[in-house]
Image: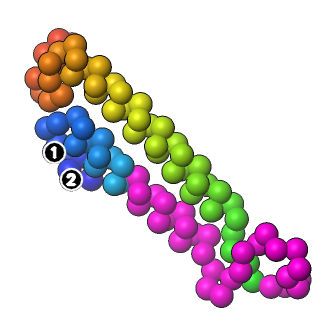
Amino acid sequence: LHGLVTSRHAVHAIGCLSVVQSGTYVLLLAVGYRRGGTAPYFTDIPPGTLVTDPVAHALTLTDVVVGAAVSALLLALVLQTAKRHGTADPDALTGLKG
């Protein structure tokens, strides 16, 4: 989070954002984890068996896909900004101040 706030280059800030978002993967997986639990997709497990939460795992997978799409979009925007303005430094983009 510190790198995201203090970054002076847009690509570095996007990389820091990806690292911060990785923390949400760990959080979601920790919420759905149960010690000794089995995967809930087997049909031959007896009733009352402790299973992990499949919703948390599905949300984690969705978070990974959305994170990749957001990172790709942000990198494309930085690339276009660098082409038009010649820099990826947020402070040097004087035409965008308002």
Residue 3, relative to residue 73: is it above or below?
below
Neighbour tally class for label 1: few under 14, some 14-19, many 20 plus, Cα within 10 Å: few
Whether residue 34 is visible: yes
The residue positioned 88% from the left and 85% from the top of the image is: 46
Question: Which of the image's four quarters has the C terminus?
Answer: top left
Left-right relation of 24 to 78: right
- Residue extent of the magenta highlight: 21-49
Q: Is residue 31 magenta?
A: yes
Residue type at the position of mark 1 = Thr
29 sits to left or right of 73: right
Q: Nearer the viewer, residue 61 or 53?
A: 61
Residue 5, x across and y down, in percent: 21, 45
Query: Where is mark 2, residue-wise?
Result: 2
The spot of residue 37 in percent (x, y) is 68, 82
Q: Disc 2 marks which amino acid?
A: His
**Distance Cα–Cα, label 2 vs label 1:** 6 Å
Secondary structure at numbered mark 2: helix
| Mark 2 Cα shell of 10 Å, populated few (<14), some (14-19), many (≥20) | few
Secondary structure of residue under mark 1: helix
Please indicate, yes or no, whether residue 97 appears anywhere in the rendered image.
no
Is 47 left, or right, of 64 in this rendering? right
According to the picture, the residue beneath numbered tag 1 turns out to be 6
